[in-house]
Structure formats: structure tokens, C-alpha cells
Image (spheres, helix red, strand yellow):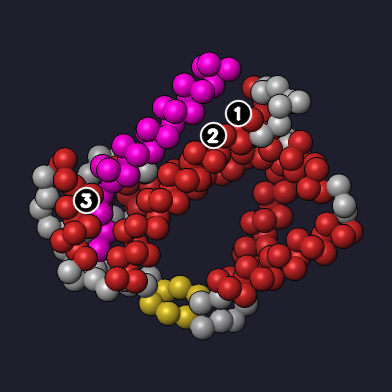
Amino acid sequence: MLFQRKYCIFSVALSWLKILTMPPRSLSPAPVVPFKLHSLGYLLLSAEKMSAGLTLSYHIVPPLFLIIFTSAAQYLAQAGNPDRKFQTWFILGNCFAWKVVGSLLAWALLWLWIPSKKFPGPTTSFGYTPIYQANGELYYVGSLAMLGCVVYINPTLCVSIYQNMGPILGVLNVLAFSLCTYLLIKAKLDRNPVDPYLRTSVSSPFF
């Protein structure tokens, strides 16, 4: 138990370190800022060129979410189910965990095909403008409604998810690692000479 607590604290500290050293993204070329003031200094400088909403959405909320959800995941892995001890095979998940995560992925992909209003995201420093679908609120309400229907049909679903939280976290880790590896290889093969984020070491763009 002492080792698990130390590991949880170490993971949270590591997430803070990654946030403080992660490369910034902005609407314009990033200014040169000393390493120790990298994130905070860049936030203050870019705030003059960005609206309050964009600064909040792209410089404050994502780091906070990363800290909160990293800590929450470690807590769930440690104390999510005291009646079930950790087992090595949790790392790869089980059949139930893969079904749950696969269903969530299929549900999310389905919403990508539903027509909705599109809006451009912030342009990167090398000229790329991502396009997003403005259906977040509808997706949230629809997901809650679908969950209610599924639980009505299968009342023990939430209990099963609770009992298999360890394997589910294992599946999510496997998928996240695989996706990051794929995106890193794809970015390296389709290298853009003006993309500054592909000029760093492998560990930086992978993170």
C-alpha cells in the first residue's frame, strides 16, 4: 500500500513536470522564453494576442484536465475496487473491458458521421487550421440518454464496470499507447518541413 501511494504521488508529480516542459501551441510563432518560465511566460505573452476565451480553452483548461484526470486514474487504479486485488493481466484488460471500450469508440465514431455545424480551430504557427464539429452538447445529452436506455435494459452494467475498472484502465492504456505510436510514425513519415514540433526529439512529439 505504501508503494502504491508513492507511485500515485510520483505520477501526479510527473504530470506536473510534463505540463511545465511541454511545447506551447499558439496562433502565432512562439516567442523565445527561458526554460524555467517556459509555460507561465508563454501564457502571459500569448494572452496579449489571444482572446480570453481562447487563452482559457487552449492554455488553462487542458493542463488542468491533464492533472485532474491523471490523478483520478491513479486513484481508481489503486482504490477503485478494494475487494479485488491487482493482477498482472489487468494491464491487457479482459473480454468485458474490451467490449466496453469498443462500444464507446463505436459510439464516438458514429457521432463523427452525424451532420453538424463545423467551425475552425486556432491556426498553428505553421499555417494549419483544424476543423471541428460543433455537436458537443448534443453528444453529451445523447450519451446520457443512451446510458439510461442501456442501464434500463441491463441494470447490472454499472456494477460490472465497477468490478472491472482495473482491466478497463488497462485497455485504455493499451489503446492510448498504440494511438500515440501510430500518430508519431505517421507524422514522421509525412514530415512537414515547416512544422517546428517535428524537429525535436522523439519523446517530445510522442507526449
Quadrant of the snapshot with the N terminus = top right
Q: Tag 1 or tag 3, which sits nearer the N-term?
A: 3
In the structure shown, which secondary structural element does the residue marked by tag 1 occupy? helix
- In the image, what residue occupies the spot 53% across and 16% down? 2
- Asked which quadrant contains residue 51, the reply is bottom left
Left or right: where does residue 119 sit relative to residue 92? left
Residue at x 55% of width, y 71% of height: 136
Q: Which mark is residue 3?
A: none
User: Callout 2, which amino acid?
Assistant: Gln
Residue holding disc 2: 74
Chain part drawn in magenta: 1-26
**Image marks 2 and 3: residues in contact by CB distance under 8 Å:** no
Earlier sequence position, callout 2 versus callout 3: 3
Tally of marks: 3
The residues bearing labels 2 and 3 have C-alpha atoms spaced at a distance of 26 Å
Mark 3 is surrounded, within 10 Å at the Cα level, by few (under 14), some (14 to 19) or many (20 or more) other residues, namely few
User: In screen coordinates, is 132 left or right of 153?
Assistant: left
Per the image, the residue denoted by label 3 is 40
Q: Name the amino acid, label 3.
A: Leu
Residue 183 horizontal/vertical position (percent): 42, 51
Relative depth, front residue between 126 and 1: 1
